[in-house]
């Protein structure tokens, strides 16, 4: 089947304005109310549409860079069903990966999907593809890639094309020859040529709003001078070929380090299109997450991420795209479990654009294993159900654009990263409790450290341990951020004790003795973690 591009596909992209919330099981996750008129631009640290309105990228990673060179999962579900699922989970965008050889190796790219799968002994997956996506088997790999882009377009899903590596396969080892300019499989000229080809291809798909030039630079050849030299070349080449896309640049050391930008800025001939990306997993810090007091760890590691990458957005230098992070959805990885509330607090507070790793419940073939399950995938092995609804609820708190432009009428909301919920004071009970951040109570929090419910004369007042705090007409409680995480809100209660804000088993706000502010390595303080998030949108 040949792919025919119609006139409409070339017209400016209009993403649907989604107003209704969809219900997945018991979880209310709302598609993001974003009306994006592509192309997108940057405005200081924000990504905006042509009218200057903020567009928060809330993406999932969806790989198509492994050996078969086809978007994963097409043997399990029809592509359109998966795309609708992505939107029903509240995401507006996909970071879609591709191997350089898809556009630089004609003999690979001109294989059909059928040949690619048969050649790898994946006849069972091929049968699934034929059953679920009958359009795919006879297409060449490059045409199947284009057909996916066209389907994303029809489903109003924004795309960031990510050049993941050169040779199709699983990524990324320290010295696998794909890591840095000059490596065995990473010829800078070939790379620039490949980027130009992909940028040109993307001009037919206005929903491709960004191109991430290379995933996770790494390896023994890594150095800052070559980073500037080649990233500038790649950025100019992409922009010249396709001036519509955002140009997204990865840092060094597996995309965990952009600190060199503190002292030396990058020079490109164009404006309002550069975005930087950062990756942050629990294993980015080895086994540290299980080896200390969680407040100290979260404080220390967050500061390091700020110094290496977060400063870009904090100092309004550019948007920061947290383009990979994620956890094992089974909840069995102790490091992941400790890292998750910390990164959620950080990503919500900083209001970063993001892409979760990952969408896929499985791979056709990964590292020699057929139909390998991906426990970091949002979807289960069948690509039909959400693997862990509790986890999705927590992650969906990041889909909300907390700050919108212009940055006026700002207040604070209290974000609870352990649940991904926020403190609300709404119906039906009119009690202070956790509920969706879309309905968060707005607070004023000034130098006096009172928490005043916005637009009222009521202040949050601590009563005592195991008692709910109350809203009182004058405040005796000053709330301080204590512990190295900066996430404990502590006050002196009316009975004279020092307490921390907490939640009980029913999600009602209470105060309790502060948990393991320091020292204790095994205790979990996160029921008492609250991020003060600036917002003018909820
Ligand atoms: C193209 O891919 C094939 C199969 O992996 C490989 O043998 C060949 O060397 C590649 N050619 C180029 C130009 O990269
Ligand atoms: C793949 O191609 C072979 C011919 O080489 C054909 O017999 C087979 O039916 C094709 N499979 C699918 C699923 O299209
Ligand atoms: C998709 O493929 C799977 C086998 O991988 C099969 O169980 C399922 O019925 C197929 N779904 C459709 C809609 O064809
Ligand atoms: C930037 O320059 C300052 C002052 O010379 C230096 O202390 C700092 O280490 C540099 N930072 C980086 C990331 O190179
Ligand atoms: C946090 O950083 C401080 C100061 O660098 C250090 O003394 C402490 O051991 C670190 N704590 C943890 C848990 O990493
Ligand atoms: C979902 O993740 C939580 C931890 O975040 C875990 O306790 C729970 O068992 C997981 N549920 C499933 C179905 O894996
Ligand atoms: C996944 O699909 C297989 C085969 O269709 C089925 O046996 C299994 O029950 C499904 N698992 C889930 C969790 O839906």
Image (spheres, grey):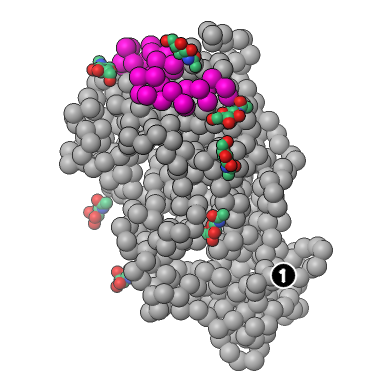
Residue 36 figure quarter = top right
Element marked by disc 1 = loop
Within 10 Å of disc 1 (Cα), the crowding (few <14, some 14-19, many 20+) is: many
Residue at image location 39% in from the left, 15% down from the top: 115
Residue closer to the observer: 263 or 85: 85
Relative image position of residue 234 (x, y in whole percent): 32, 26
- What residue is pinned by disc 1? 432
Residue 200 figure quarter = top left
> Is residue 474 covered in magenta?
no
Q: Residue furthest right?
A: 428
Residue closer to the observer: 300 or 520: 520
Relative image position of residue 499 (x, y in whole percent): 57, 83
Residue at image location 31% in from the left, 48% down from the top: 257
Residue at image location 64% in from the left, 61% down from the top: 422
Residue closer to the observer: 229 or 421: 421
Residue 58 visible (yes or no): no
Relative image position of residue 104 (x, y in whole percent): 31, 17
Chain part drawn in magenta: 103-132
Name the magenta segment's main secondary structure: helix
């Amino acid at each position: 089947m040949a792919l025919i591009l119609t006139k409409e596909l070339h017209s400016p992209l209009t993403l649907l304005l989604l107003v209704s919330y969809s219900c997945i099981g018991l979880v209310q996750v709302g598609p993001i109310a974003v009306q994006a008129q592509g192309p997108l631009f940057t405005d200081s640290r924000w990504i905006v549409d042509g009218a200057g309105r903020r567009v928060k990228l809330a993406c999932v990673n969806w790989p198509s860079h492994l050996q078969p060179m086809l978007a994963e999962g097409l043997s399990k579900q029809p592509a359109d069903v998966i795309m609708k699922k992505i939107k029903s989970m509240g995401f507006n965008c996909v970071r879609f990966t591709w191997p350089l050889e898809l556009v630089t190796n004609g003999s690979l790219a001109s294989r059909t999907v059928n040949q690619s799968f048969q050649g790898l002994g994946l006849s069972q997956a091929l049968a699934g593809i034929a059953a679920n996506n009958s359009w795919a088997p006879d297409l060449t790999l490059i045409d199947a890639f284009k057909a996916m882009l066209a389907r994303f377009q029809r489903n109003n899903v924004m795309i960031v094309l990510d050049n993941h590596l050169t040779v199709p396969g699983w990524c990324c080892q320290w010295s696998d020859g794909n890591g840095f300019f000059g490596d065995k499989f990473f010829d800078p000229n070939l790379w620039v040529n490949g980027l130009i080809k992909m940028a040109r291809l993307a001009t037919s798909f206005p929903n491709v709003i960004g191109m991430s030039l290379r995933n996770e630079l790494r390896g023994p050849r890594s150095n800052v001078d070559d980073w500037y030299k080649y990233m500038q070349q790649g950025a100019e080449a992409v922009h010249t070929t396709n001036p519509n896309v955002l140009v997204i640049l990865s840092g060094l050391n597996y995309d965990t380090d952009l600190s060199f930008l503190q002292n030396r800025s990058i020079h490109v001939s164009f404006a309002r299109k550069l975005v930087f990306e950062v990756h942050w997993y629990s294993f980015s810090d080895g086994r540290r997450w299980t080896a200390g007091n969680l407040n100290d760890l979260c404080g220390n590691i967050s500061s390091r991420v700020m110094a290496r990458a977060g400063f870009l957005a904090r100092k309004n230098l550019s948007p920061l795209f947290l383009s990979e992070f994620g956890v094992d959805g089974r909840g069995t990885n102790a490091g992941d479990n400790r890292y998750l509330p910390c990164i959620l607090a950080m990503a919500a507070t900083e209001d970063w654009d993001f892409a979760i790793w990952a969408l896929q419940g499985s791979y056709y073939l990964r590292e020699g294993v057929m139909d390998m399950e991906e426990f970091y995938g949002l979807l289960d092995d069948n690509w039909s159900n959400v693997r862990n609804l509790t986890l999705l609820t927590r992650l969906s708190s990041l889909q909300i654009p907390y700050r919108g432009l212009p940055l006026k009428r700002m207040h604070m909301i209290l974000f609870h990263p352990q649940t991904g919920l926020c403190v609300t004071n709404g119906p039906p009970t009119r009690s202070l409790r956790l509920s969706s951040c879309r309905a968060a109570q707005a607070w004023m929090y000034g130098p006096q450290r009172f928490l005043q419910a916005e637009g009222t004369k009521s202040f949050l007042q601590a009563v005592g341990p195991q008692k709910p705090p109350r809203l009182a007409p004058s405040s005796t409680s000053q709330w301080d951020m204590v512990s190295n995480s900066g996430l404990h809100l502590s006050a002196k209660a009316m009975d004279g004790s020092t307490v921390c804000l907490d939640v009980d088993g029913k999600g009602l706000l209470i105060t309790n003795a502060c948990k393991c502010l320091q020292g204790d390595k095994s205790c979990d303080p996160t029921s008492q973690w609250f991020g003060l998030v600036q917002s003018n949108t909820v």
